[in-house]
């Protein structure tokens, strides 16, 4: 289902049609370490230990300079790393004839090469190949979707109200945002279903919780902590938070991260959560069976009262052992708990309305201002909610993709 449209972009089939996966995103994945580094094994059978990914080179030559690697238990080596979507791109770009690539010690590719295919440098030197696709922490479509959201969030502080939306009548605008929100919900449930198939219920909940506690800048390291320290280890008190933080030394992003969101704080928070409610994943499943069906059509103020969303929020908070509250709890509910519950059982009661009318959580700056300027929310009749924010976000992402 994959074809290369250019040497640096692959087109793949996603939930709603084709989506692009650029080579630059693969480079970001390598830089952030958003893959199972403990299981990284080159095609020649040697384990690859990534001590440091190297310095990202945005000019000519190898993609990463001065990476620090170790083959199995051997000595540490320093060299360059080149990344491609396909292993054949090495030969297509004639890197073997370019002296700038003589220091490459590892060729990282997204898709597995054909059997017997090798990467060779100058003098026919064989260069080890590492395939990332089986090691990725997410589905390719989810990586692409998250990257689009992060790009939008990065410029959302200066977000202007789109003129195309200002020109719409109130009913047409509301219908458009509801349709976009419904698409975002289906996408989140789709990704949750993929996670459940890969991990099972308990591990999927565990991974989602730690990932969301790491938003926005530390998702990858948090997921690796989740994989390295399964839920059972947390229940039994066998996880040393300081050791878990040290194991990801150099991977954590602290710039722009508030003290309350620092990795050590969030991991201690999760330790307290599991200590207080060790069977929280089963409590979540039981709570999901009691959730009311909810429509997204009613106004948010009314829907929150009818479906007692404030009371449900307290129940989710107790399920977290009281360790998580505020907007981060709302993120846990909307990005983790509700999609997992919807994906858990085919034909489950419709709970998208709860997700729609839930509290907004952590929004990219500018979304709330735009919704108020468009007149679709106000403080009384239609307070800010998660669904309208996601609807506007979905429209902006689609608008960007069309440009």
Image (spheres, rainbow, N blue to C red):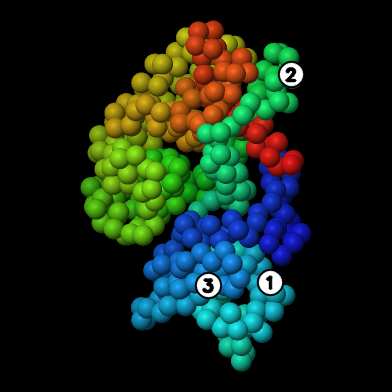
**Residue 369 in view, yes or no:** yes
**Mark 2 or mark 3, which is nearer to you?**
2
The residue lying toward the viewer, choosing from 188 and 259, is: 259
Q: Mark 3 points at which residue?
A: 81
Q: Which of marks 1 and 3 is nearer the N terminus?
A: 3
Q: Name the residue under label 2.
A: 168
Distance from disc 1 to disc 2, alpha carbons, whole Å, reads: 46 Å
Q: In this view, does 399 lie to the left or right of 70?
A: right
> In the structure shown, which secondary structural element does the residue marked by tag 1 occupy?
helix
Q: Earlier in the sequence, mark 2 or mark 3?
A: 3
Disc number placed over residue 373 in the picture, else none: none
**157 in relation to 202, above or below:** above
**Mark 1 or mark 2, which is nearer to you?**
2
Please report contact status of discs 1 and 2: CB closer than 8 Å, yes or no.
no
Q: Is disc 1 surrounded by few (<14), some (14 to 19) or many (20+) residues within 10 Å?
A: some
> In the structure shown, which secondary structural element does the residue marked by tag 3 occupy?
strand
**Residue 296 in view, yes or no:** no
Taking the spot 43% from the left edge, 78% from the top edge, the residue there is: 78
Name the spot of residue 48 as percent of width and height, x first.
45, 72
Q: Name the residue under label 1.
A: 89
């Amino acid at each position: 289902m994959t074809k290369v449209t250019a040497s640096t972009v692959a087109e793949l089939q996603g939930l709603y049609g084709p989506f692009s996966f650029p080579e630059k995103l693969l480079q970001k994945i390598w830089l952030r370490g958003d893959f199972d580094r403990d299981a990284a094994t080159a095609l020649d059978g040697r384990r690859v230990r990534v001590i440091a990914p190297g310095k990202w080179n945005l000019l000519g030559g190898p993609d990463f300079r001065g990476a620090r690697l170790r083959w199995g238990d051997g000595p540490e080596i320093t060299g360059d790393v080149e990344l491609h979507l396909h292993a054949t791109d090495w030969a297509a770009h004639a890197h073997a004839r370019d002296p700038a690539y003589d220091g490459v010690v590892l060729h990282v590719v997204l898709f597995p090469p054909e059997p017997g295919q090798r990467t060779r440098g100058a003098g026919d030197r064989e260069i080890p190949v590492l395939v990332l696709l089986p090691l990725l922490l997410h589905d390719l479509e989810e990586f692409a979707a998250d990257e689009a959201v992060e790009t939008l969030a990065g410029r959302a502080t200066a977000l202007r109200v789109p003129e195309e939306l200002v020109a719409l009548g109130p009913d047409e605008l509301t219908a458009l945002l509801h349709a976009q929100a419904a698409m975002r919900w289906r996408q989140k449930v789709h990704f949750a279903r993929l996670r459940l198939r890969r991990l099972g219920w308990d591990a999927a909940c565990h991974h989602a919780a730690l990932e969301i506690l790491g938003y926005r800048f530390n998702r990858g390291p948090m997921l690796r902590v989740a994989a390295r320290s399964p839920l059972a280890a947390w229940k039994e008190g066998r996880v040393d938070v300081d050791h878990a933080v040290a194991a990801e030394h150099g991977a954590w992003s602290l710039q722009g991260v508030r003290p309350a969101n620092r990795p050590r704080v969030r991991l201690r928070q999760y330790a307290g959560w599991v200590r207080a409610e060790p069977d929280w994943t089963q409590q979540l499943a039981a709570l999901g069976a009691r959730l009311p069906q909810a429509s997204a059509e009613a106004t948010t103020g009314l829907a929150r009262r009818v479906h007692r969303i404030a009371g449900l929020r307290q129940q989710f908070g107790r399920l977290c052992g009281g360790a998580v509250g505020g907007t981060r709890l709302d993120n846990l509910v909307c990005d983790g708990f509700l999609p997992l519950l919807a994906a858990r059982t085919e034909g489950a009661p419709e709970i998208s309305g709860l997700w729609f009318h839930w509290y907004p959580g952590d929004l990219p700056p500018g979304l709330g201002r735009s919704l108020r300027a468009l007149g679709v929310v106000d403080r009384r009749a239609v307070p800010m909610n998660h669904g309208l924010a996601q609807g506007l976000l979905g429209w902006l992402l689609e608008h960007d993709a069309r440009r």
